[in-house]
Image (cartoon, helix red, strand yellow):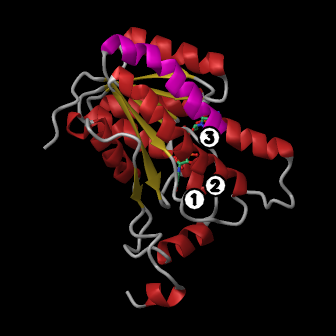
Amino acid sequence: MLTSLKDRSVIVTGGSKGIGRGIAKVFAAQGAKVTITARGEEALKATCDELNAAGGQVRYELCDVSDWESVRAMVDSAAAVQGGLDVLCANAGIFPQAKIVDMSPADWDHVLSTNLRSAFFCVKAAIPHFEKAGKGRVVLTSSITGPVTGFPGWAHYGASKAGQLGFLKTAAMELARYNTTINAVMPGNIYTEGLQDLGQEYLDTMAASIPLKRLGAVEDIGNAALFFASDEAGYITGQQIVVDGGQILPESLEAIDEI
Ligand code: NAP
């Protein structure tokens, strides 16, 4: 049993849908005060209503994580309303597909900006609040794609997710002076709106390639984030955990058939 996070102040970027909504749900169920952010207001409002109907203390802010001023304003506002900042979950991300031969420089920049530059922006904006509190927690949503595996069409995505882990190592050292930890969750294939957009055939193929024979649930990632945010994880920093149902383990198609 982890120490309660009741009334802790939490931000979840990309919290309107998918994994971010799952992270917000897990923290809200703990009694934390949660600000979810995204660009689309309709989904933010729907998620807020759903989590508050279940007893949560959830609010939303519009924010584009690829824009520094937008991130700084959102973090400052959330901290002002929630009485400081304890936990930042930098989760928002996109995964459009394009083979390198077809990928434009703009495609590359869009993905790197949304997925990687945003991690830098979110952490930078949060530092003054962690310094003020004398403590803090950051949890990044990385991926197995990039740091561990490859997938045609996701060279830019994989680079952004591996880049997050490179950022993490030095950030962990720099945040230590604020008694703040930073760690990353590396999801495998998690059943989200974003993944559904890739089509049923993709979902079925991926589920068949996972030793636990199912896609992950968003709460599986939320629970890992909750652990990193807990008091009990206070001596863990600069680390990452794979949450993938064993997806990266099989050495071959035969290996998965043996299960
Ligand atoms: P999703 O269902 O498409 O949700 C993405 C969320 O991010 C939405 O709330 C979206 O809202 C927000 N977002 C996107 N661009 C944004 C921007 N520029 N500024 C602010 N918010 C933005 O995606 P997901 O599957 O939950 O993925 C969430 C994270 O998990 C991503 O970082 C992804 O790389 C990572 N991940 C996912 C999987 C998976 O299997 N699903 C696996 C590994 C890693 P708006 O569009 O309204 O802004």
Q: Position of residue 13 (x, y in %)?
A: 50, 32
Which residue is located at x 53 percent, y 17 percent? 74
Frontmost residue, 238 versus 22: 238
Categorize mark 1 by other alpha carbons within 10 Å: few (<14), some (14-19), many (20+). Answer: many
- Left or right: 107 in relation to 88: right
Tell me the kind of residue under disc 2: Gly
Q: Position of residue 254 (x, y in %)?
A: 49, 91
Which residue is located at x 46 percent, y 55 percent? 187
* Main secondary structure of the magenta stretch: helix
Question: Which residue is label 3 attached to?
Answer: 115
Tell me the kind of residue under disc 1: Thr
Question: Which residue is label 1 attached to?
Answer: 145
Quadrant position of residue 43: top right
For marks 1 and 3, give the CA distance. 13 Å
Which of pointers 2 and 3 lies earlier in the amino acid sequence? 3
Is label 2's Cβ within 8 Å of ligand 1? no
Question: Which residue is label 2 attached to?
Answer: 158
Q: Position of residue 202 (x, y in %)?
A: 60, 69
Frontmost residue, 54 versus 141: 141
Element at label 3: helix
Residue 37 visible to an observer of this rendering: yes
Is label 3's Cβ within 8 Å of ligand 1? yes
Q: Are marks 1 and 2 in contact (CB under 8 Å)?
A: yes
Please say if 213 is above or below 154: below
Q: Is residue 149 a member of the stretch shown in magenta?
A: no
Please say if 208 is above or below 139: below
Tell me the kind of residue under disc 3: Asn
Is label 1's Cβ within 8 Å of ligand 1? yes
Q: Name the image quarter holding the C terminus.
A: bottom left
Which residue is located at x 62 percent, y 40 percent? 115
Q: In this picture, which residue range is highlighted in magenta?
A: 114-133
Element at label 1: loop
